[in-house]
Amino acid sequence: MDYWQSIILGFQVALQWNNLLFCFIGVLIGTLVGVLPGLGPVAAISLLLPTTFHVTPVSAIIMLAGIYYGAMYGGSTTSILVNIPGEAASVVTCLDGYQMARRGRAGPALGISAFASFIAGTIGVVGLMLIAPPLAEMALKFGPPEYFSLMIMGLTILTFLASGPMWKALLMAAFGLFLGSIGLDNMTASARFTLDIVELSDGVGMVPAVMGLFGIAEVLLNVEHSIKRSVFETRIHHLLPTLRDWRDSLGSILRGTFIGFFLGVLPGGGAVISSFVSYAVEKKVSRTPGQFGTGVIQGVAGPEAANNAATGGAFIPLLTLGIPANSVMAILLGAMMVHGMQPGPMLVQEQPGLFWGAVTSMYIGNVMLLILNLPLIGLWVRILKVPYPILFPLILLFCLIGAYSLNNSVVGVLIMVGFGLLGYLFKKFEYEAAPLILALVLGPMLEAALRRSLLLSAGSPLIFITRPISGLLMLISFFLLAYPLVPWLRRKRAILPQATDEE
Amino acid sequence: MAKFNNDQISAAVWLAVGVAVALGSLNYGLGPLAAPGTGFLPFLAGCAIALLASIGLILATLKRHAGVGWTPILRGVRWQKPLLVLAALFAYALLMKPLGFVLCTVLFIGFLLRAVEPQRWPVVIGGAVAAACGAYAVFNLWLKTQLPRGPWGF
Amino acid sequence: MKIAMRQWLTRGMGMVGGVCCFLLVFMLALPGVAPAQEKYPAKPINFIIGYPAGGTTDICARPLVSAAAKILGQPVVVVNKPGGGSAVAVALLKTEKSDGYTIGILPSGAVLSQHMRKVPYDSAKDFTPIMQYAVYLYGMVVQTDSPWKTFKEFIDYAKANPGKIRYATAGPGTPQHLVMERLAIQEKIKWTHVPFEGGGPAVSALLGGHVEVISQTTEWKKHVESGRLRLLAVYGEKRMPDFPNAPTLLELGYNITAPSLISIIGPKGLSPQVVDTLHGAFKKAMDDPDFIKAGNQMDQPFLYRGPKDLEKHLVQMNDEVGTLIRNLGLRKE
């Protein structure tokens, strides 16, 4: 069969010793970069580009891809340990991962996150090989109205994410949409709500918002309490997930993989939406949804699997349509173009060595990441044994440097500190920050999709309902919104007859 | 304060925010529905904030009548500490450029170690200097992040 | 407390040791990071492209940029900031420091945009021109299974069915948008413009059947070659060598060609030494075989102008397209 030959060819390329070495360097640097906030994978790749001039394109791509998923993994590490998500896709990991760490279960959280990533990455690569072409055709059916409806569905799913009342979660999402609209209008380039601050032209920025709302706010809440109440449970029971953890999270990993892979096919936002969707699904299928947010392992395993599987899915539009889903795919595409390859269905046939080499190296990279990170878990967990009064200034310092180095500007730092204050108040008044982040990230895309859809339909909002895929997504959103009201209505109805009975 | 509960207060603030956002968006032009303009989405977002805040306000008022009052948000905690930390963060942002990264960081870490949960002075000074120099070495020298320099070159 | 501290210190040492090993490996993996020099360029340069990755502009610019980076001896990092037909990226570039560490592409779309609507920059005044390296070729493309076999059939349909045709471009104010507006005026057609953030998404929208036609640079090439899309007309002065059967608008009897420019600029006030260094590197990079290959593959003809020529050309182009757009009454506030 064709696929087997492709896979064998890929492994032949990826298992050459120099490619293995580059893969290892890539994941190692990626992990470190992911752990250091503010220094994203793109910055790391820029630092390493000169070294790739001297190596073959396959090696270069393998290393750059390694940095990318290494950084994704590193981002989860800081989410779990200190509540600072390195990127939007790991915001969800904070919700339960950090709570697990506080209960002395940082080890299992980190472990299951590594295993979930590994399993999802593996299935993602296999899926990529088997069902790429039909999926790409399906992705084409997603026009502006479908994207809009998909993002609306992503936002309504937040009502499941939220532990508080629904109106608060939706309000945070609406506020996030507003924050996302700050900056230059993406369709006309006219400035909006920038208050004449030059740095705001480029928007509020997800990273300072996330570090403020999660990292800084968490520190502010922790220093309120006296030293007697330690922030972390220092007695660590297990470094690795137990058999019971495995039983609990295996289903979550598989569901997350499935969700991540299919949503990852859609260019842009796939990894972010899929991690949120996966969390919502886990909460829905759980027998104890009330426990979510207090350190449930399924809440870590599902989303981590989802955002990793999305990486595999993201290859599909690149491979079949030449549309890169993120900046790393773009670099990959650029490298392919330089070597005379047209993106598109022909690409795999013309340069099978490079393409399958890169794909299988991602698989090998996942193995390496697992081998590299399991011993490191012990090291990371030890960080939590540092007394909090000494640890917290360092956490703040990392956030400050991260926010500053994004644009080398104090404005980024001020935005982050402002979001820290906001996040503190949100906690005090019981608002959840996660919906805000998702809306902030999706905002610009959602706006463009909305405006394009209305152009397509000459101003008729019916376009969102009459087109089949969009209509289906809207219907799901509607049910998600109506669902919490149903038991409320049912209870009302149940009370009424009872009342009449008593009369 | 005791007249209202927490959700009533926060929802009222959000209502004001929503109205302000919606009104502010009008300046940028909504455009016709067939070709939405720059202010279209922020206007919708502002309206949504205002609408949801109104719902929240109504629900919270119903709860108020059901007897849910103000829950103090600062009782039983050392609310001065987060205030100190916030002040330090703002001061750091403002002094970073004039003082330079290293000095500013030494002062910042030193202040936090001493003021929030007082450590012994050797720990304070040693920790502050070590953290500042370590961070400088990692970020500025190895990773070549452009951290601000003070008038004395570091 | 003291015991706890000592315990922490001993454990902490292990941790510190681990981190040090980690950093050591990291350092070894970072060759070429020498102590800071004052000579320009002393650190990586950001290169802003106003279209998404995978479009014609991006695909051709990347090999040019990596070739120039080799010559400059510093990484040049491509940053894609799509939106508003490149106007978003150019507006952001205007706000950058003029230290030579942030430069970017000024394409014709960003020049035309300033005459068609309000944008926060003036392409003739707010920037330091560095070099022009190419021009674009454009064409009008429909699906192969659409009823329109020729340009004329398509125009006749559009005239008979006002409001039925929706066309996609890489943004408002791009030359390919202007061509459509001019056709609409001349033929009294009413059709709808759906701007995307780049050519790749516009082509996807056509492939998915969300719009009837696209007016776009050469992102459609591979799909026309594979027979999935049909090229109706091109907007240059001559036919495209790869598609000799597609007529130009001039041949079809319209006095319309698309103005075209792809140039590299920096924020206003770059020092002459920086401009010299960058210009020298990018000019040399134009001989890079990978760049030439990418340009030929994407049908993006090379056209070189040095900093002085480009400066003059920008003023002239702004005058010309400004007058044209004003006379056509296409400026919207």
Image (cartoon, grey):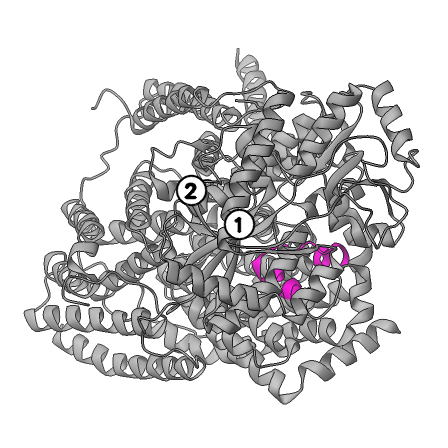
Residue A420 in view in this figure: yes
Q: Is A320 contained in the magenta span?
A: yes
Residue that numbered label 2 is attached to: C126
Rendered residue at 41%/40% (across/down): A201
Residue type, numbered disc 2: Asp
Pointer 1 indicates a residue of which chain?
C
Q: Which residue is the site of mark 1?
A: C310
Q: Where is residue A24 in the image (x, y as percent from the top left)?
A: 54, 80
Can residue A441 be seen here? The reply is: no
Label 1 or label 2, whichever comes before in sequence order: 2
Q: In this view, does A57 lie above or below C99?
A: below
- At horizontal 27% and vertical 58% (from top left) the residue drawn is A396
Gap between marks 1 and 2 measured at Cα: 14 Å
User: What element does badge 1 sit on?
Assistant: helix
Which residues fall within the magenta stretch? A316-334
Q: In this view, does C154 lie to the left or right of A360?
A: right
Depth order, front residue of A40/C254: C254
User: Residue extending furthest top?
Assistant: A503
